[in-house]
Amino acid sequence: MTTTPLAPKPFVRKATLFSFVFVLYSYTTGGPFGFEDMITTSGPGMTLLYHLLIPFFWCIPISLVAAELTTAMPVQGGFYRWVRAAFGDFWGFLAGWWNWSASFLLGSVYAVLFADYLGFYFPQLTGRNHYLVAAALIVVITYINVRGIQMVGRISTLLEIFVLLPVVVMVVMGLVMAGNSTKAQGKIGYISLSELIPAMPEYKKADTALNDYQSALGENVEDMKTAYYEQDSLLSSKDTAKYTRAQLELKKKNMGEMLVKLQGWQQQAQQLYQQKQQDLITPIQKKAVETVQAVAKENGYTYVLTKEALLASPPADDLLPLVKKKLGLK
């Protein structure tokens, strides 16, 4: 009696449950990219509300449909097999083809997005280098997928832990800061820097120096105007008859150069004045702010607001008298 040997079963690599969960998470979510625009345009409150509500109207229904169909048709192929069974081979093929094409397109989009994020830290990553980085990422991800589901699972797990770790750290930091803020008694003060800075003696000296500098710049401009008008009136008078044609052309050329120089100097004088103003006023503003911070720390103020920017605020204390006293001002 002879027996037919059984055909060897093909070796199938399987991913662990832990790796499979992260593969599914990577496929459906992939990480918190895109939150920047949502938070800046809608605010953190609306963003959180959206992400809390969207699972009930989209994610959970889709998950229940997938679970029901997978239970009813326990075959490989997923939605391709479901569409094929319901609508025929043509629509089943289109469903698979569309998903396959979308996966390729999304893969390239994510690679470009990765290069965009990397360009934030490396501004020189533009043009050809940008595309090379995106193409290199596609090659690496393709190699990982070719190696099999086990490597995909391990890499997906590591990448998603790397993505979620900063989120966990920030959540913990937020909870700690929220706990500390509830324990601390917030003492709020306000001050008007536009009232404080002009009262400082350094500002008065700087203001006098700025006025003298502005006067000197103005005198220089007036001298240049006077020279230009004198030359213009000379060329407009009858005395031009004593000049040769070549001399007149040279004088007219000089007048054109004087006009260009005058116009350029007027713009340059404004820039010089602004630079001088910044050089003189910035140290005074810095001293005022540092004094306000010192007074706030000495008197236990948690927040100090600028009076000029307030439209409405909770009850607060005016720190102007305390700051003036520290600076020795009356």
Image: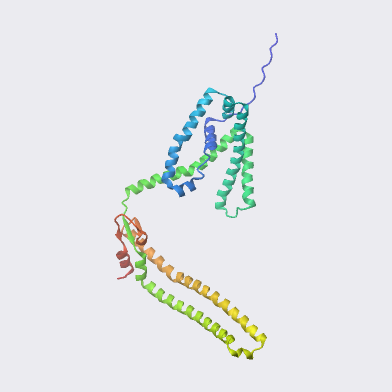
Q: Which of 5 and 233 is in front in this view?
A: 233
Residue 73 to residue 325: above or below: above
Q: Tell me where residue 160 appears, x and y as whole percent.
A: 52, 39
Residue 7 to residue 222: above or below: above
Q: Tell me where residue 17 appears, x and y as whole percent.
A: 53, 30
Instruction: Indicate left or right for 118 with 175 as reference.
Output: right
Asked where in the image residue 49 lies, by quadrant, the reply is: top left
Residue at 39 percent of width and 45 percent of height: 176
Q: Which of 329 and 87 is in front in this view?
A: 87
- Look at the image and tell me in which quarter the C terminus lies: bottom left
- Look at the image and tell me in which quarter the N terminus lies: top right
Residue at 49 percent of width and 41 percent of height: 164
Asked where in the image residue 263 lies, by quadrant, the reply is: bottom right
Extreme residue toward the right, this view: 2
Asked where in the image residue 235 lies, by quadrant, the reply is: bottom right
Residue at 53 percent of width and 25 percent of height: 70
Instruction: Indicate left or right for 120 with 302 as reference.
Output: right
Residue at 62 percent of width and 33 percent of height: 97
Q: Which of 237 and 221 is in front in this view?
A: 237
Q: Which of 213 and 82 is in front in this view?
A: 82
